[in-house]
Amino acid sequence: MSKQWTSPNTIIGDAATGSRYLRREHINENFWREIKKGNHILFVAPRRVGKTSIMQDLADNPEPGFICIYQNIEGVKSKNEFYKRLFDLVLQCTDRSKKDKIVDVVSRWVKRYEIDDISKSGVKIKSKELDYESELRNMIPELAESGHHTIIFLDEFAEVINKLKKQNRAEDAIDILHTLRELRSDADFCKFTLVYAGSVGLQFVIKSIDRPKLINDLHPIETGALTESEAAQLVNQLVVGATMQMDAEIIGYLMQKINHLLPYYIQLMIQEADMIGKEQNNPQISHAIIDAAFDRVLKKNKNFEDWLSRLKDYQPIHFPFINHLLITCAHNDKITIQEVYNIACDAKHNYKDDYMDFVEELMNDGYFIESPKHVYRFISPFLQQFWLNKFPIKND
Ligand SMILES: Nc1ncnc2c1ncn2[C@@H]1O[C@H](COP(=O)(O)OP(=O)(O)OP(=O)(O)O)[C@@H](O)[C@H]1O
Ligand SMILES: [Mg+2]
């Protein structure tokens, strides 16, 4: 064995790119098919499933005839800021494109708006204050004349809408949703697609501001766990050239252990298994190393803390009821619909009329799966164990 220990090719946390990224062609194809049909996309999925990685990959590898830009718009705090951000994105996206006709469009805009600089960090305009909303309405049809189709991936859009609502700016949120809906139905904007992404259940937020119609024309695209063969492919991809060795049997054991095959969980396990292998100077990853890696991943609470804090954040009023369901499920390995109902009828909760909304939310947000019918379980053993560690005492 060589003395030098080489760790696997993985960086945890950031969106995966290049050889660290496993592309699922069917997801990319799904996007392109729907965009070509003229649909606008709602890309909302639970945290850490790989949304940002997918969108960055799509934006970096557009099909011919499309120009794309990806941006996380998390910091947007008002409707004006939103329109300014969109205005900047259209400029940044077109400025990067060296395609015929687009270059002419950009130079026309640079003159018209007296633009000093367009860079990755934004657009600098000499002095004038613009009405960004109405300028967007002018620019996008002009851009379409170049023959290219523009796609803007707005990551964390759902979070922005939710934040506006929470900060008593529901009117701003409604205004943004309303304008975007109007643009989508305007024929002049048919070569302009927005992908609305995030991990907050946007439908839920919109329902709470009483405007479900504002997004019901969006086409949802879903993403979830990897299949077993995709997971095996990712493991092999990550350990190429590494000292640690994992044969097919041990990869199977790793998959069985994490069950819900998110690339994120695979990364965490590979990283810990590598560290343990290195400490033991043992490149051959064993069942015992996988078990120890699982426990270590869980000990680093920050990996899962977010699953708890976002429930408290998005559902502050309903949290005690939701958490009662989660704790019961964590301790019993499952929760039946009857048990849900009994908890809902408990005087301290009183959710007799709408308890299923919360069960559905827990399924949509990636906590529970239903298996078999009317029996709910944690989708991930990591999450279940995290809940047990956090709430070792069962509720009555
Ligand atoms: N297809 C993939 N191949 C390899 N690694 C991936 C893939 N998708 C996601 N990951 C890894 O999983 C983690 C989460 O990915 P990403 O940030 O893309 O997810 P997300 O859904 O945008 O998360 P969040 O909801 O926190 O914004 C990252 O560490 C990333 O490197
Ligand atoms: Mg993300």
Image (cartoon, helix red, strand yellow):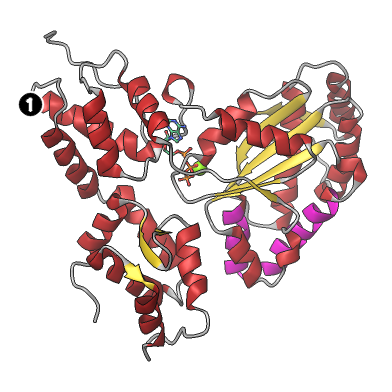
Label 1 is placed on what type of residue? Answer: Gln
Q: Quadrant of residue 88?
A: top right
User: What segment is highlighted magenta in the picture?
Assistant: 158-183
Name the foreground residue: 382 vs 33.
Answer: 33
Asked if residue 137 is positioned above or below residue 103 in the image, the reply reads below
Asked if residue 60 is positioned above or below residue 160 in the image, the reply reads above
- Residue 274 appears in the rendering: yes
Residue 163 falls inside the magenta stretch: yes
Q: Residue furthest left?
A: 280
Name the foreground residue: 262 vs 55.
Answer: 262
Q: Position of residue 393 (x, y in %)?
A: 18, 72
Q: Residue furthest top?
A: 2
In the picture of the structure, the residue carrying the numbered disc 1 is 280
Residue 169 falls inside the magenta stretch: yes
Q: Is residue 188 left or right of residue 358?
A: right
Task: Give me the residue at 62% from left, 24% from top.
Answer: 60
Q: Quadrant of the N terminus?
A: top left
Task: Give me the residue at 45% from left, 73% from top.
Answer: 316
Q: Residue furthest front?
A: 372
